[in-house]
Amino acid sequence: MKTFKTKNYYIPTKKLKGKHSVKLAFLSDLHGLMFGKENEELLRRIILGAPDAVLIGGDMAYSSNEDTLEMTTGFLCRLAEKLPVYYALGNHESRMMADPEMQEKYFKFEDLLSEAGICFLHNRHVSMKIHGTDFVFYGLELPMEFYRKPKPPSLSLREMEALIGPPSKEGIQVLLAHNPRYGNTYFSWGADLIFSGHYHGGVVRFTENRGLISPHFQLFPGFCCGEYRRGKSHMIVSAGLGEHTIPVRIHNPRELVFAELLTGE
């Protein structure tokens, strides 16, 4: 059976109401990979971590293999029976959604998950109160041109706000943004906590924040993996739970991410 590790981050904030911490699980880039029958090991480890909510940062399926939709559906439906789940799309879901040959199967996938209680964030936001604190979860869904190889366009703050609007001034703002290439814009936008994936840890990982290459074939890309800070904002880039096409990882284990917000600063 393929393996993954659990990666924990601890984030102090003065925005929590009361003394109770809040834990969020973050899943990204599974690409239909299985950890045990019907992903029972991944489900077990998420439940064991006891998060208050589960956030999905996209690419749970692989756009060149429609079977990965079905492989992922059962696992996510069982997860939604246990915990609130919020899902922002990655480039693989967006590609399926735009492909006439894949659309029907993709929309069935999304309908089944929505019926199970999973909340899809198509350039929108939803609020949730956790232990007395208001959280606002945003899902940024970039057009496919922002995944173009080898040179995608830049993303301005104005363009980002045209997609999802400005952040709320109330509560804790959490941004799910699959592509970490635009980390500087995400920080400027003003989220308290940002989750990204997409880069698979740079394939070959040298340090906590340093990987070899991005999907755009950029060497030593910025915002490649790990945690980044700017002022009171934090960005976490997952190395992902799976891979596709060239299944190579060197010093770069698959990871399930937990981020625990703690009272303080």
Image: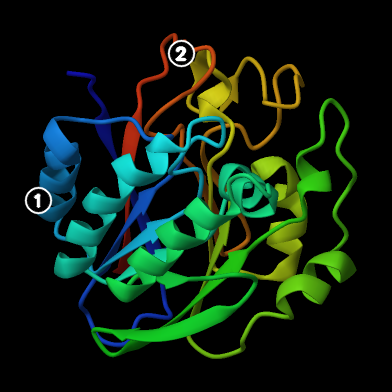
User: Which residue is rendered at x = 53% and y = 70% of the image?
Assistant: 121
Q: What residue type is labelled 1?
A: Leu
Residue at 23% of width from left, 84% of height from top? 131
The answer to which image quadrant residue 110 occupies is: bottom left
Q: Locate the C terminus and report the quarter of the image it occupies.
A: bottom left
Q: Name the residue under label 2.
A: 247
Side of 223 where 113 appears, left or right: left
Residue 228 position within the rendered picture, expressed as x and y whole percent measured from the top left: 57, 45
Residue annotated with mark 1: 48
In percent of width and height, residue 111 lies at 42, 68
Visible residue check, residue 73: yes
In primary-sequence order, the first of circles 1 and 2 is 1
Label 1: few (<14), some (14–19) or many (≥20) C-alpha neighbours in 10 Å? few
Choose top left, top right, bottom left or bottom right for residue 181: top right
Q: Is 223 on the left or on the right of 209, as rendered?
A: right
Q: Distance between the residues labelled 1 and 2?
A: 28 Å
Q: Provide the secondary structure element on which disc 2 rests.
A: loop
Out of 204 and 247, give the one closest to the viewer.
Answer: 247
Horizontal side of 130 relative to 135 (left or right) equals: left
